[in-house]
Image: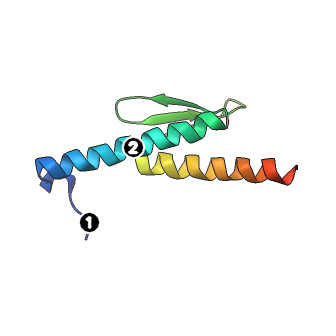
Amino acid sequence: MKQNIHCLSWNEEKISTNKKLKLVEKAESKLIQIGYTLVTRSTYWMVYDLVGGRQIFETPEELYKYSYRKKYKHDQLKFSHI
């Protein structure tokens, strides 16, 4: 059952916030490894790729999924040339 963020206790909200911050940190690490730029705003994240394309994400989960897929594809291309 999905919880509503407004119904969380202070401790649960703190844990949720920490998890989201860790996802953003992991995503940033993956994006830096492949040369992408992450710009953080108060309510969203923008990712600029190597050719100037831009993606906008409103949740840390979406940002992490994107960074994971891009890092995976980058690694696959790197190993296919070896």
What residue sits 46% from the left and 35% below the top? Answer: 45
| Residue 13 in sight in this render | yes
Find the distance from the CA under tag 1 to the CA under tag 2: 20 Å
What residue sits 64% from the left and 48% below the top? Answer: 70
Question: Residue at label 2?
Answer: 22
Q: Split into 4 quadrants, where in the image is the N terminus? A: bottom left
Instruction: Count neighbours of disc 2 (C-alpha within 10 A) and say few if under 14, some if 14 to 19, many if 20 or more.
Output: few
Q: Position of residue 65 (x, y in %)?
A: 52, 52
Q: Amino acid at mark 1?
A: Lys
1 vs 2, front mark: 2
Question: Residue at label 1?
Answer: 2
Tell me, for residue 27, which label it has, or none.
Answer: none
Where residue 76 sits, quadrant-wise, is bottom right
Q: Position of residue 34 (x, y in %)?
A: 67, 37
Left or right of 26, for residue 51: right
Left or right of 80, for residue 34: left
Cβ atoms at labels 1 and 2 below 8 Å apart = no
What residue sits 72% from the left and 31% below the top? Answer: 51
Q: Position of residue 13 (x, y in %)?
A: 19, 48
Residue at the farthest bottom position? 1
Q: Amino acid at mark 2?
A: Lys
Residue at the farthest front position? 82
Q: Position of residue 74 (x, y in %)?
A: 72, 47
Q: Is residue 62 above or below residue 34?
A: below
- Label 2 sits on a secondary structure element that is helix
